[in-house]
Every structure is written in C-alpha cells, then in structure tokens.
Amino acid sequence: MIPLSEPALHGRELEYVADCLQSGWVSSNGEYIDRLERALAEYVGVDHAVACNCGTSALHVSLILSGVHANHEVIVPAITFIAPVNAVRYVGAFPVFIGCDEYCGMDVSSVRHFLAEECSSVDGFTVNKATGRRVSAIIPVHVFGTPADMDAVLALADAHGLAVIEDASEALGSAYKGRKCGGLAALACLSFNGNKIVTSGGGGAILTNDDALAEGARYLTTQAKEAGIEYVHHAVGYNYRMNNLLAALGLAQLETIEERVATKRANFAVYERTLGPTGAGQLLQQPAWSDANRWFYAYLCADAPAKDKLLRTCLASDIQVRPLWYPNHLQTPYVGMQAYQVGRALWFYERLVNLPCSVTLAPDEIAVVVAAIEACRSAT
Ligand SMILES: *Cc1c(COP(=O)(O)O)cnc(C)c1O
C-alpha cells in the first residue's frame, strides 16, 4: 500500500517521549511544552507561540481573541479542510464562503468584490447588505501549503476593519514573499495533526507578535484560570492546552522540519518531471509570491470522469489517493449560507485528486503512482 500521507518519525521522537515518561511530567505542564513553544516561535520568527490540543481549538480561541461575536460573519474559503468553518460556528458567527483562485486558494479578487459590492459601511462597521450582519473577520487558509496572497488580504482587511486569522495549519515551512507563513497576521494558527508536516499525534498552536494576545491565548486555553493558588475565573475558558507528552513528540518532529520540507519539495519535483507537461492533466502550480512547503500534491484531471477513473484505479491498486475536500458551502450544516463566486471551487472539486505525498515516499513508489496516472490518461 502507498499511503497518502503517513507520519515520518525518524528523529529524536522516541528519546524525547521516553524522557518525558521518565520525568513523570506527562500532562499540562512540563519543559517540552515550553521548548516546543520557543522552537516554534523561533522557527516562524514570531514573539509568541501558545501550544494547543489541536488546530481547531487554536482557531476557536483566535476568533474569540479577534472579537468575533455571535451573529457576526467571517469570510472563509469554500475549499479547505472544514476546521476553520466549524470554528466560526463555535463562536456563533456565520461563514461567508468565497471561491477559488487558480491555485485552489481563496480568491482575493472575489473577496474584494464581495466587500465592495455586497457590503456597506454602517457606523464604521462592514455590514453584509444581504443579511444585515457585521462582517468582522477573514480567515485566509494556505491551502495545500501554498501561501494565500497575504498582502492583498491584509490591505482589504485594513480597509474594511476586519480581523485576520491566518490559518497556516498546512503551511509550516512555507514562505510568502520570503516571509514564513504563520507570522503574517496578528494571529496565526498551526495544526500538528497526524498528516501535517510536523505532527505531535494531535495538536496545534497560536502564533502572534502581540504580548496581550499571547497572554489572552494562554488564559483562554487554560480554563481562564487567574494566576495564583485560588481557582478564580473571570471568563468562560477552555481546556485546550497541549500536554507535555505530545509536545515532546512535536519538538522532535520540529527539529527535522527543514529535511521534511526539502523532501516534500524534492518528491514534488520528481512527480513533475516524470508526469511531464501535458494537456490531459497536471500538478497544481504555485504563484510567484510563494515558496510552498508542498505539503499536499494536487493533480488536476482533465474532467470529472477522468478524476473518477483515477480515484478508482489507484484505490483498486492500493494507492491512497483522495478527492479534494467537498465544497464547504454544500456541507449539510452550511447549506443555504452565503457562497460568493464559487464556480471555480466546484470546477476544482470535479477535477482534483491528492496524490501520495508522505515524507517517507520512495522514488519507486512515485513511479508506481505515475504509471497509474499514465494508464488512466492513455485509456481516455
Ligand atoms: C488540519 C487543519 C486544521 C486543524 O486541524 P486539527 O485536526 O484540529 O489540528 C485547521 N485548518 C486547516 C486548513 C487544516 O488543514
């Protein structure tokens, strides 16, 4: 079997986890949490990292810290893993779904049009004319590890008074115009889920340069407990902190990030070379501003039947491929919510297949995947 994306645990994972077990500090305090947070902040180039129990909880807390309240609206991509969309609902706000640019990221020109044509300024707030609700934030997602056009997003957000939460869950190791993803907005979120480029088994982080936001993130993720020996809470908090055992695993993973990113990029190049240029199908490219970590490889089929055929052929021969995430505006909880210029999102959904992309992927395995793709191409 050729897995889609399996973890590679070839560094000091066992050593650190064993050390953690021997120390007895396996829960919500311990040196590995501090070390992981420091290493993350240093790697991305931000002042603070607050480790969380998953990326979704990092997004939830970031929305609260950004002042997103119930019945606000938050601009999100139609095509992304659903986590940021669900987090919007956790605070009682509503998503506004935006379609794709040519790289499968959120189309910033659609965001611009949405804000210009569909919204108006009321008492200094941006209000969606169709719903009467305040639009208070935007969550750009670096889909597949390819950076969104953050300068354009930040300029729009600035002009319309929106908070920006950078969902860099897929983009640890990616750079935008030479700057590391995860450090491009007031708040950014990471995920260390099992298929991410760095995993702690499960986990996430909130990154920021703002001292008060970092303090707020620590407070809310630890049940909003005030400092001191008394159990006093002045807000509704959450049990969202990472534990030391998982931090030990995550730290060992982070220590080898440069190799992982290099391997992801090298394997992408091998796919690209062996697939060759063709009109019948191709790997999704990256924009000029991007130096992507190539977390996920996206192969664009000629049409929907070609995609179905490739999925069936590969799965029948134990090659783990998968279709693009189903468009979020069509998911059951989100049917009927506003979806703006989502034509290309559907177009991508009909054509896109994610190919095996593990760091452990061997050249002969890539050859097997490419042979399967070529067999499908020549049969159509
Ligand atoms: C993985 C991921 C998350 C967070 O997922 P968790 O499993 O909660 O860590 C958030 N956003 C995106 C875009 C993701 O890919």
Image (cartoon, helix red, strand yellow):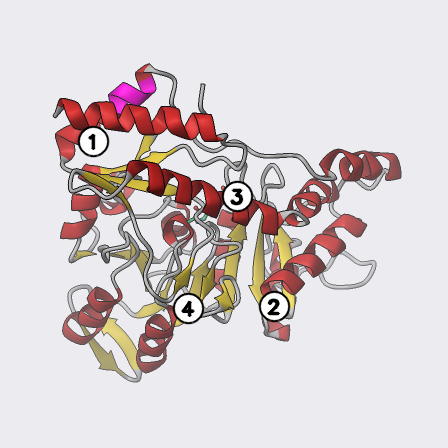
Earlier-in-chain disc, 3 versus 4 = 4
Q: Picture quarter containing residue 73?
A: bottom left
Residue 347 lies in the magenta stretch: no
Residue wearing tag 1? 307
Label 3, on which residue? Answer: 263
Frontmost of labels 3 and 1 is: 3
Q: Residue at point 41% right, 30% down?
A: 366
Tag 2 near tag 4, CB within 8 Å = no
At 29% across and 70% down in the image, what residue appears? 134
Residue lying furthest right: 23
- Work out how far the residue at label 3 is from the one at label 4, CA to CA, in angstroms: 31 Å
The spot of residue 345 in percent (x, y) is: 20, 49
- Lower position in the chain sequence, tag 1 or tag 4: 4
Q: Give the CA separation, mark 3 to mark 2.
A: 22 Å
Determine whether the residue tagged by mark 1 lies in a helix, strand or loop: helix
Q: CA distance from mark 2 to mark 4?
A: 18 Å
Residue 17 seen: yes
Rendered location of residue 276, percent (x, y) = 27, 40
Quarter of the image for the N terminus: give it.
Answer: top left
The three-letter amino acid code for the residue at tag 2 is: Gly
* Residue 359 percent across, percent down from the top left: 53, 37
Query: What type is the residue that disc 1 sits on?
Result: Lys
Residue segment shown in magenta: 311-315
Of the image marks 1 and 2, the number of the one nearer the N terminus: 2
Residue behind mark 2: 45
Q: Earlier in the sequence, mark 2 or mark 4?
A: 2
SS at mark 4?
strand
Q: Nearer the viewer, residue 360 or 371?
A: 371
